[in-house]
Amino acid sequence: MTDNVLLSVNDITKSYAGVDALKNVSFELRRGEVHALIGENGAGKSTLIKIITGAVEPDGGEIKLNGQTLRHNSPRAAKQLGIAAIYQQPALFPELTVAENIAIGLEQRGLWARIDWRERRCHAAELLAQVGAKIAVDAEAGTLTMPQQQLVEIARALGAKARVLIMDEPTASLSEEDAQNLFKVIRQLRGQGVGIVYISHRLEELPLIADRVTVLRDGCVIDTRPISEVNRQQLIQLMVGRELSAVFPKREVALGEVVLELRNVGCAALGVHDVNLSLRAGEIVGLAGLVGAGRTELASIIFGLTPADEGEMLLHGRPIQITNPAQAIASGIAYVPEDRRRHGVILPMAICPNITLAALDRLKSFGSLDFRREKEIAADYTRRFGIKTPSIFTPVANLSGGNQQKVALSRWLVTKPSVLILDEPTQGIDVGAKAEIHALMSELAAQGTAILMISSELPEILGMSDRAAVIHDGTIFGMLDRAEATQANILALALGHKLIEAGAPAASQTGQS
Amino acid sequence: MKLGRYQREVSAALAYAALLVLIGFIAPSFFSATNLRDLALNNAPVLLVAVGMTMVILVGEIDISVGSQFAVCSVAAGWLAKSGVSIVLLLPCVLAFGAAMGAFNGFLIGRVRLPSIIVTLAMLTAWRDGLRWITQGAWVENLPANFQWFGLGQMSGQWLIVIVALLVLIGFGWLLRNLGAGRAIYAVGSDAEAARLAGIEPRNVVFGVFVLTGALVGLAALLNAVRFAVVPSNAGMGLELKAIAAVVVGGAAITGGRGTLAGTLIGVALLGTIGTGLTFMGINPFWEKAIQGGIILAALASDVALGRLEKHGRLNPARTAAS
């Protein structure tokens, strides 16, 4: 048993500015094992990973790889020993091609060796084929989608012959289909004896992929168990230390009249066409579909980021042309983008101006901004959403992901929108914050806001939406009401299979998930 | 907490105070009324340009054409005065002239999305050499009598210049802090795409900032020109570097989104004082530029050092509460 241990972390302690990030954490990874590491944001997962990859030095404790203690660990040393990490946000060089990105760090021929371009491209293509990615090796990395970039990173790790592979929320930005592909790759690596540390907030996928699970809470290891011995509910309990009554609490709300209606809307540049959709006051419509099918693109049309070039849009029954975000906001449409770290909030800015940024014209008093009211608004939302921060003047960059998302949401709620578009509202945030955001969405719907929620998580779509719109190939391929919306039906539509009568998938064999 | 937000301005102010104390010990004559007045007069135009430059840097751009714009505006002011334009009309004319040059920059940078360093480098040469070609290097002489000090006489004219510069500083400081437009400048400089998603149009903000900067350069040129009997056609040489240096020394981030006009005021004062301060302390003035360069490097280095400390969580009380 012990000789099968690939990596062991013993009694690791780390504190930042006197606050314990990790307290006597011990953790072991066996050969050919997928070991899930879960915990709320701030539980210490990131710190543990940074210590294993050598990015951060622990205050105490030791790390052993193949029974040998790693003394001076550094990112370079860790890499040479075969420890590779893939983070949630892909870290590729956007201006370099896929082949060049894969080659970086793999080719150890020295700075002055001539580059064999053909070999480099062949090697890259081979590695990409291993992860089942159909990506051109000459494409610039910056032009790839997030899941594609991730696959490139995995290919790079494969090329580096990694023995320990750390994956930080690899499926957070993947659609179901892409996630299934990824699992195939992970199983294949496991078969080769690679040890995989797998971090995820998607608890439902753990039984599919993990062998054991370790739960961290407040910097301590709470428990390590074989995945077959725990269920989802138990895991959540271990993570939060309390029982969550329901993770997806969409309240029943009497629906009002149609607020927003799209008729044959399309935009050639984005590959979106013939979209028909209506949103009623108090309604949450889930927008499901594979990544790249046109979900975010549809949101950007409605919000005026890329104006529609065909069809018509009606707001409160009146035709409206939206050509830029400012106009959308003035019309009562709000959009919380997917990539909140980049564009949902302004990271270096404090919480207070972030919250009021979209509603500055409401803060005017005698030509100047009304600072007292601004502070009141910011303090009010900070309290109501339980944003954990020492002050409303703290830069948003210093908050955890869940709290950043609450700031992003607050900004839009200040504008009192009649239509709220949420793009992956709970991606990569912990269970507690997720439940809070869901509760908030319910409350907004109860107040009469029409919500369009884009999500890659089927349970979220199923739990939160009154209706689910499934987008496929640039258009809404099917609309399911609550009774019809099942995981199987949504998947079938997302993959392009028509449903016959009463929600039975036409190609029923593909409907089983 | 409050100090944390203005830490860079505070450290620039402390450096300035230390410099004043040092000069006070070595060369107390520096603090004579005449010298201080000259210092204020010489630096009033620099301050005006630096106010514009602060906004340009806050939105994450740069403008190295301000020195050439300054020369064009100076000569234009001289010609207009000579051709009999009344002193009352002169001000709006020169402001409009500067604003038009700024608008040209702003159009290419904000609308066409060309990089500001390239656009303003081109304009730096184009305005300067265009002016040399038109004037054939000749200075504007025989200015009408009421042009000098706006015909107010030296004493009141001098004070007017300094007061105008300070009022502009205060006015723009108020604008940056108290108007939505000021907030928009910071937002665009921090993250233009996030600002766009929040309903701010970054293109318009960038355009507006360059127009304002052009107008401020025009004002600076006019206030400078009235001090002398002639307008040299090579006015404002190196002004862009002075302004950029002052802004950076005052704590603004060259990448945009962070900085204040209070910092810029300290930066202008610090760099201006060093020039004459050295002479008073009996140091060879040839060292002036080298020492200025050293100060800019020191300002940037301390900025980076502070950034590193923050990153490692030592100066960052917020991390504690967030985890």
Image (tube, coloured by chain):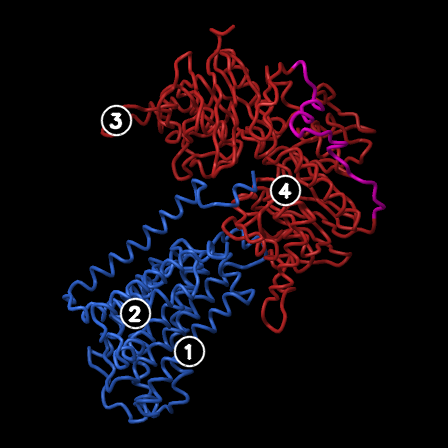
Chain colours: A red, B blue
Foreground residue, B81 or A416? A416
Magenta-highlighted residues? A228-255
* Same chain assignment for discs 2 and 4: no
* Same chain assignment for discs 2 and 1: yes
Q: Mark 3 lies on which chain?
A: A
The answer to whether residue A229 is magenta is yes
Q: Name the residue under label 1.
A: B96
Q: Is mark 2 on a helix, strand or loop?
A: helix
Instruction: Tell me where residue A104 appears, x and y as whole percent.
Output: 36, 29
Q: Name the residue under label 4.
A: A423
In what quadrant of the picture does the C terminus of chain A appear? top right
- Image mark for residue A110: 3
The answer to whether residue B236 is magenta is no
Q: Mark 1 lies on which chain?
A: B
> Mark 4 is on which residue type?
Asp
Instruction: Tell me where residue B67 appears, x and y as whole percent.
Output: 30, 69
Q: Residue at position x 61%, y 32% from top?
A: A40
- Total tally of numbered discs in the picture: 4
Q: Gap in Å between the C-alphas at discs 2 and 1?
A: 17 Å
> Mark 2 is on which residue type?
Gly
Q: Gap in Å between the C-alphas at discs 1 and 3?
A: 58 Å
- Marks 2 and 1, the one that precedes in the sequence: 2
Instruction: Tell me where residue B141 appears, x and y as whole percent.
Output: 23, 87
Q: Mark 2 points at which residue?
A: B67
> Mark 1 is on which residue type?
Ala
> Mark 3 is on which residue type?
Gly
Foreground residue, A337 or B255? B255
In this picture, is B66 found above or below A218?
below
* Same chain assignment for discs 1 and 4: no
Q: Mark 2 lies on which chain?
A: B
